[in-house]
């Protein structure tokens, strides 16, 4: 069982960037796993506070995934945000 921590913004910039880097690695691993195990198309995009881009796309082109999202009716797009 993992330890319980209170989730809140890390005030110290250096610690926040290090934490983001470590958690991003784990998150990307999980995103890849769910794409493979569940045979789903996944697009993950994150920008760090230093404006660095992290991305993963289970398809060849991110543009194709974004186009699929854009082509969804607006009502369906909004329900995915919850």
Image (spheres, grey):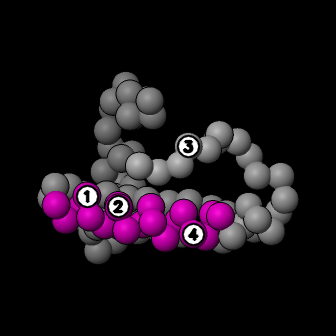
Q: Which residue is mark 4?
A: 22
Q: Position of residue 64 (x, y in %)?
A: 32, 62
Mark 1 or mark 4: name the one nearer the start of the chain: 4
Mark before the other along the chain sequence, 2 or 4: 4
Q: Distance from label 2 to label 4 (Cα)?
A: 15 Å
Q: Position of residue 2 (x, y in %)?
A: 47, 51
The residue at which mark 3 appears reads as 4
Question: Looking at the picture, does residue 65 appear above or below residue 32?
Answer: above
- Residue corresponding to mark 1: 34
Instruction: Please state which of the two labelled residues, at mark 2 or mark 4, is closer to the viewer.
Output: 4
> Magenta part of the protein: which range?
19-37
Q: Quadrant of residue 15?
A: bottom right
The answer to which image quadrant residue 70 occupies is top left
Residue receiving disc 2: 31
Earlier in the chain: of badge 3 and badge 2, it is 3
**Label 2 residue SS:** helix
Sooner in the amino-acid sequence: mark 1 or mark 3: 3
């Amino acid at each position: 069982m993992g330890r319980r921590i209170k989730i809140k913004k890390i005030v110290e910039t250096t610690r926040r960037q290090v934490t983001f880097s470590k958690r991003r690695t784990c998150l990307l691993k999980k995103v890849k796993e769910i794409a493979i195990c569940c045979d789903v198309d996944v697009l993950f995009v994150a920008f760090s506070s230093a404006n660095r881009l992290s991305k993963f796309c289970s398809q060849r082109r991110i543009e194709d995934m974004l186009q699929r999202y854009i082509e969804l009716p607006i009502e369906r797009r909004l329900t995915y945000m919850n």
